[in-house]
């Protein structure tokens, strides 16, 4: 809990300076961490989130890593090394858990609060502004993504699927990935009008999960399709995680990070603007 | 003070030509308001008059479409967070946090204001006592009755020790006892120097609480003054109420119109505005009027409201 608070405090401070320049005045009180606190209080069973979050990738790991893996044999890793199939897909599942955790809170939970709970109307009567709300909700969603990943990362460590000290960085990397997905998730949800629109979220998330080199290398695709796959964020998350857990870290990691930096920034700015127009009527 | 432009020091709210548009519809159509430190200021008006829209602009949660507005000497467009930090807001519709307990609703809200945990804890205990919810403190929110939620909303609005409170129909949904409890609390706040802005549909509430009020209709202010001034200006000293059997009242307004300053016909009764109600009643009897019941009373804000908006609130 204390660590969580620390984290969110830093998160606020580092952004405050930048925000003053990018956004109009009066929309930010610098207290986004209070929303994170509120969410933590509201979902008392934080541990349940962690547990439920890593079971899904765990099942995939068992079914595909063990089951399918026995048929597949080994697969070439990022640096050409031979990996067991489980070791190949585990970082992919790790990336997907960061995405899923973040997207869950940034879409469903956020939509309920926005449309039905009137929660944000109450917050706006305090010094909090729409930017605090955007940041706070992104922060909470990214923490959930981070918790999912942390749980799954623990399992990977336990069963020996992390092959390099670089693997330690998979957790901060997962937080960063979750941040980007949370930002885009909040921004997208702010445009949604009804529950039907959520089918679109599924339509984006499921194919990304299946085709982003999660379960097989990018090289199986013809080059045109390779370009397409590389345009989507989960591919970059999967590659980043795979290079970290296998220790084959190169300059391309910076490229992936840059992708998420842009995604997070765009998502955050759009979310802030949308919340401003939606809430300050 | 940053952003203040030649403001009178003890005017907490100053609006000039204030307007609010929603798309092409104009909900507030250019109003002037001054609220002085320490007073209780009321908004009266029928449904849709623009009371809530105005209060939301003052609360800095709804940007104004046009005109000037200063709250606590600052401009809501620029200093929104600073202003809101010193306001207490009770919205027309409760928006408590349904996922938190009664106590946590206060705790978390105080934290939004930047209060420390210790300060919030102490203040929350005090406030739960103030609105008599201490024994429900650990209940989940859904277990509260409507009136209890209203009281919690009021407690929540006080968490930051506000200088200026905006209460949008604070007593709607409260039983008479809870209403009187709240009036008493509001009166105590006023004595502590808190400035209150209240909108209400209850004329007795306005008469009891407000030092000064405005009557709004169709997005405009149609009258302004103390309850007593308004009654003197827009009504007579006394009112004669005549009730007739259903269907019989037609025609009487014409017959009686010269006996009173003004005659108002409601669905169930006739109101005759005159300085001397008893004398008017005697004169009416002489003209052969035979109502089922009669009542002579003093004018109230209700009569002012009826006169100004052409609508009655209590039947
Ligand atoms: N967000 C909004 N979008 C569009 N129209 C709105 C919005 N809010 C209020 N209005 C309109 O503005 C007008 C004034 O509404 P407002 O809520 O200020 O009235 P009010 O005086 O508070 O009424 P009541 O006594 O019913 O609470 C109404 O016609 C209402 O339909
Ligand atoms: Mg209203």
Image (cartoon, coloured by chain):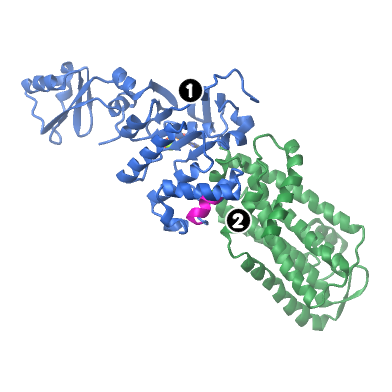
Chain colours: A green, B blue
List x then y, in percent, for residue B165: 48, 35
- Residue closest to the far bottom: A70
Residue at x-position 57% and y-position 56%: A196
Q: Are marks 2 and 1 in contact (CB under 8 Å)?
A: no
Q: What stretch of residues is rendered in magenta?
A: B101-107
Q: Is residue B169 above or below residue A190?
A: above
Q: Which residue is mark 2?
A: A39
Which numbered circle lies on residue B310?
none
Dot 2: what SS? helix
Q: Is residue A44 above or below residue B102?
A: below
Residue at x-position 68% and y-position 53%: A139
Front in this rendered view, residue B150 or A230: B150
Tell me: is circle 2 under 8 Å from ligand 1: no
Q: Which residue is mark 1?
A: B34
Dot 1: what SS? strand
Which is the main secondary structure of the residues drawn in magenta? helix
As drawn, is B307 to the left or to the right of A30? left
């Amino acid at each position: 809990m204390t660590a969580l608070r620390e984290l969110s405090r830093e998160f606020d401070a580092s952004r405050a300076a930048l925000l003053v320049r990018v956004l109009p005045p009066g929309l930010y009180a610098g207290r986004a961490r209070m929303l994170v606190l509120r969410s933590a209080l509201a979902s008392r069973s934080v541990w349940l989130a962690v547990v439920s979050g890593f079971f899904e990738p765990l099942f995939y790991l068992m079914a595909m890593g063990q089951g399918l893996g026995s048929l597949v044999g080994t697969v070439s890793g990022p640096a050409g090394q031979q990996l067991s199939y489980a070791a190949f897909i585990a970082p992919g599942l790790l990336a997907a858990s960061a995405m899923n955790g973040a997207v869950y809170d940034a879409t469903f939970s956020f939509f309920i609060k926005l449309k039905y709970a009137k929660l944000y109307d109450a917050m706006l009567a305090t010094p909090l502004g729409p930017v605090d709300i955007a940041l706070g909700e992104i922060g909470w969603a990214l923490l959930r993504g981070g918790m999912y990943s942390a749980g799954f990362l623990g399992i990977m460590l336990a069963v020996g699927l992390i092959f390099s000290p670089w693997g330690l960085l998979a957790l901060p990397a997962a937080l960063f990935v979750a941040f980007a997905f949370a930002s885009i998730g909040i921004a997208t949800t702010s445009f949604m009008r009804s529950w039907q629109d959520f089918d679109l979220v599924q339509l984006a998330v499921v194919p990304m999960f299946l085709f982003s080199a999660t379960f097989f290398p990018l090289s199986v695709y013809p080059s045109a399709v390779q370009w397409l796959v590389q345009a989507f964020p989960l591919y970059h998350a999967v590659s980043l995680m795979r290079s970290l857990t296998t220790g084959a870290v190169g300059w391309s990691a910076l490229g992936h990070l840059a992708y998420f930096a842009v995604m997070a920034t765009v998502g955050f700015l759009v979310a802030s603007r949308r919340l401003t127009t939606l809430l300050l009527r | 003070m940053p952003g203040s432009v030649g403001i009178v020091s003890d005017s907490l709210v100053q609006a000039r030509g204030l307007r609010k548009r929603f798309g092409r519809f104009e909900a507030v159509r250019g109003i002037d308001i001054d609220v002085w430190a320490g007073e209780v200021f009321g908004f009266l008006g029928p449904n849709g008059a623009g009371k809530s829209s105005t209060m939301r602009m003052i609360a800095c949660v709804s940007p104004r479409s046009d005109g000037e507005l200063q709250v606590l000497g600052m401009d809501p467009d620029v200093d929104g967070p600073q202003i809101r930090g010193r306001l207490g807001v009770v919205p027309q519709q409760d928006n408590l946090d349904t996922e938190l307990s009664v106590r946590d609703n206060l705790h978390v809200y105080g934290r939004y204001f930047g209060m420390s945990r210790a300060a919030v804890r102490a203040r929350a205990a005090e406030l739960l006592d103030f609105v008599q919810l201490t024994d429900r403190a650990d209940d989940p929110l859904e277990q509260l009755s409507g009136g209890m939620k209203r009281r919690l909303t009021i407690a929540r609005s006080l968490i930051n020790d506000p200088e200026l409170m905006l209460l949008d129909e604070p007593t709607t949904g409260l039983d008479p006892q809870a209403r009187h409890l709240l009036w008493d609390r509001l009166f105590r706040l006023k004595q502590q120097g808190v400035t209150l802005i209240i909108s209400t549909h209850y004329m007795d509430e306005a008469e009891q609480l407000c030092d000064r009020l405005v009557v709004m209709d169709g997005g405009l202010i149609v009258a302004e003054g103390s309850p007593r001034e308004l009654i003197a200006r827009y009504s007579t000293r006394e009112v004669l109420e005549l009730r007739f059997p259903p269907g019989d009242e037609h025609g009487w307004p014409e017959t009686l119109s010269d006996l009173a300053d003004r005659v108002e016909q409601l669905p169930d009764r006739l109101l005759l505005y005159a300085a001397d109600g008893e004398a008017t009643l005697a004169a009416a009897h002489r003209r052969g009027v035979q109502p089922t019941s009669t009542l002579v009373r003093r004018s109230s804000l209700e009569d002012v409201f009826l006169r100004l908006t052409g609508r009655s609130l209590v039947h």
